[in-house]
Amino acid sequence: MSMHFPPGFHFGVATSAYQIEGAADEDGRGPSMWDTFCSVPGAVTHGDTGAIACDHYHRTDEDMDLAAGLGLTAYRFSVGWPRIVPDGTGSVNQKGLDYYRRLVDGLRARGVEPMATLYHWDLPQPLQDAGGWVNRDTVAHFCDYVQLVLDSLGDVVPVWVTMNEPFCSGMIGHLQARHAPGVADLHSALAASHHLLLAHGLAMGMIRDRAPQARAGITHLLSDIHAASDSGADQAAARRLDGYENRWFLDAVLRGSYPADMLDWYQRQVPLDFIRDGDMEIMAAPADFMGVNYYETKRVAGDPDEPFHQARVIPAAHYLDAAELTANGIDARPAGLGRILRRVHEVTPLPLYITENGAAYHDYVDPEGGVDDVERVAYLTAHFGETLAAIRAGVDVRGYFVWSLLDNFEWADGYSRRFGLVWVDFGTQARIPKASARWYAQLITDQPAQLITDQPAQLFADQPAQRP
Ligand code: IFM
């Protein structure tokens, strides 16, 4: 193995609170909209919930040992808002703040740098009852919560991600209805997305004020989107889907405007009455980096019957061999990651983190008690290779966070999709590092000596910020 990354490059994993913590009713945590969504019949495969998940809340030390044992230099986690402000507004749960302080201190003591995400989809249910992200008041409540988190962790967390994948919260949750809160309404989806981006911009300002030494940015889910053919209809559909999934969010934070073609498209369907003077400037607050979550390449065809975008994603099974599909049936070939990295680099000079990349496969425990996930090893080898090629081509990628450390609660797919480097037996909570975990540890060990030192690694160390 001879993939050598630049000095200071970070090898991490990414996780999120609701997907691993469990302990949903403990130590003062309040309900989140995902607890509610999971109770809706048919919303989540097998009726699974995050109530126990990986029981990480009780196994935090064991899991930090696992992460440190792989030689990881960084660990991305999210703060669960319902643990900090159980009712969404009002009283503060000190036990929640203490929990994340212990997590952060534990990571640092093990030489692993924490990267904290402020919102990874677990909105307190009382706020959802009041309209959730469709209601602009949620933005102010988010800022109150962010203030608490910064007051508690601002001195020990070097890097903050404000929002994870506002496309998913906004559009999958409010247009596709596949995620909480399970709404299918274009106006709601656009309003929720707008408020999530506004909350990002305001959080950026708060981080600058309260943790001026920290670096901060947002993380976008970016798919590599292509037209299914050269036909005008397919080309236009692909451009629209790219506008819906990618450009709407990228342009807002990088340019302080929504893309003109999409504004026009949406305005013909619903009023964009939630956009107020000054909002776009707030969203475009200067960042220190852009987080890129990449999973999927999509082929898109025109479809006049599709109600919102007149566009349809062709199922990957229609054009790939079964062996090329991941367990969730998507086209996850690695070239798409390289294309996305180069594309983002073309539109922003910001350093990039791959804040998530990974895949679900049909993993199983073999008779010897191991999990030989050869597909994931091949996937990671190819995706790290693409990343290195992009770096060599001049793209400033500072780190790679594999999704995920543990098999976990994969939202609407429940526990039916395993993304972890470490197998979790959800009955016993036993952890078994998979072959991919050993592969990753070896990749890190094989890096030139200047990367692995006796000192704890520091995100952004040696590489000055390039704030615009
Ligand atoms: O599990 C999710 C994560 O919460 C957000 N990004 C995509 C992952 C895999 O689907």
Image (cartoon, rainbow, N blue to C red):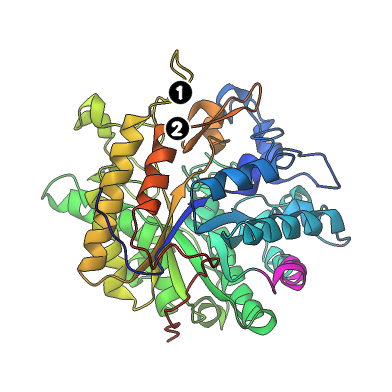
Q: Are marks 1 and 2 in contact (CB under 8 Å)?
A: yes
Q: Position of residue 328 (x, y in %)?
A: 39, 32
Most foreground residue, 422 or 136: 422
Q: Quadrant of residue 142?
A: bottom right
At a point 44% along the width and 21% down the height, the residue shown is 364
Reply above or below: 186 against 274.
above
At a point 31% along the width and 57% down the height, the residue shown is 242
Label 1: which secondary element: loop
| Kind of residue at disc 2 | Lys
Residue 257 falls within the magenta-colored stretch: no
Q: Which residue, given by chain and number where applicable, does mark 1 sit on?
A: 370
Mark 1 to mark 2 CA distance (whole Å): 7 Å
Q: Position of residue 77 (x, y in %)?
A: 60, 54
Most foreground residue, 64 or 308: 64
Q: Residues within 10 Å of mark 2 (few under 14, many from 20)?
A: many
Q: Residue furthest bottom?
A: 468
Q: Is mark 2 within 8 Å of ligand 1?
A: no
At a point 56% along the width and 42% down the height, the residue shown is 179
| Kind of residue at disc 1 | Gly
Reply above or below: 422 against 83.
above
Residue 27 is marked as none
Reply above or below: 205 against 106.
below
Q: Is mark 1 within 8 Å of ligand 1?
A: no
At a point 56% along the width and 59% down the height, the residue shown is 112
Residue 155 falls within the magenta-colored stretch: yes
Q: Earlier in the sequence, mark 1 or mark 2?
A: 1
Q: Which residue, given by chain and number where applicable, does mark 2 sit on?
A: 434
Q: Residues within 10 Å of mark 1 (few under 14, many from 20)?
A: some
Left or right: residue 18 compared with residue 424: right
First to last magenta residue range: 144-156
User: How many numbered badges does the structure rendering display?
Assistant: 2
